[in-house]
Image (cartoon, rainbow, N blue to C red):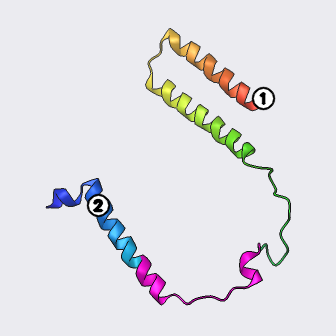
Amino acid sequence: MAELILTPPFAFGIYAVLVGILYLAGKSIAVRGKASESKTSGYASGEKHDLEPAAPGYRPFFVVALFFAILHLGVLMLGTSGLEPVTIVYIGGLILALLALILG
């Protein structure tokens, strides 16, 4: 029985039932709020929020995320490989990919 409980599908089912019970219990004791403008407006220390976003989209984030993904996966590949001549080619390709990403 202990092996059955520890299988991922069975454990997921148990957690799903527990979460459903907690969700319904919380929903039943929660107080219904009143609609107001304050609930739908942005809040920043009592000041009105800017109408323009600070960063124009997600592009800066994705560039940084892709940089670190390439860097970390490249180092992981180098760390697990042996010292062979093809490693130098791989390092060169990694450097070129990171330069292309940085320079845009």
Instruction: Look at 72% across and 48% down and name the residue there.
Output: 58
**Which quadrant does the C terminus fall into?**
top right
Q: Position of residue 38 (x, y in %)?
A: 75, 81
Q: Which residue is mark 2?
A: 11
Horizontal side, residue 26 vs residue 7: left or right: right
Residue 75 against residue 89 in the figure, above or below? below
Instruction: Look at 53% across and 32% down and name the residue there.
Output: 73
Type of amino acid at the residue the image marks with label 2: Ala
SS assignment at label 2: helix
> Magenta segment range?
23-42
SS assignment at label 1: helix
Q: Position of residue 27 (x, y in %)?
A: 47, 83
- Dot in front, 1 or 2: 2
Horizontal side, residue 34 vs residue 32: left or right: right
Residue 50 position by quadrant: bottom right
Which of pointers 1 and 2 lies earlier in the amino acid sequence? 2
Residue 45 against residue 30 in the figure, above or below? above
Query: In front here: 69 or 87?
Result: 69
Is residue 30 rendered magenta in the image? yes
Q: Position of residue 47 (x, y in %)?
A: 85, 75
> Residue pushed farthest top?
85
Horizontal side, residue 60 vs residue 89: left or right: right
Residue 35's tag is none
Type of amino acid at the residue the image marks with label 1: Leu
Q: Which residue is mark 1?
A: 103
Horizontal side, residue 97 vs residue 42: left or right: left
Is residue 56 rendered magenta in the image? no
Instruction: Look at 85% across and 59% down and name the residue there.
Output: 52
Residue 18 against residue 58 in the figure, above or below? below
Q: Residues within 10 Å of mark 1 (few under 14, many from 20)?
A: few
Instruction: Look at 40% across and 78% down and name the residue there.
Output: 22
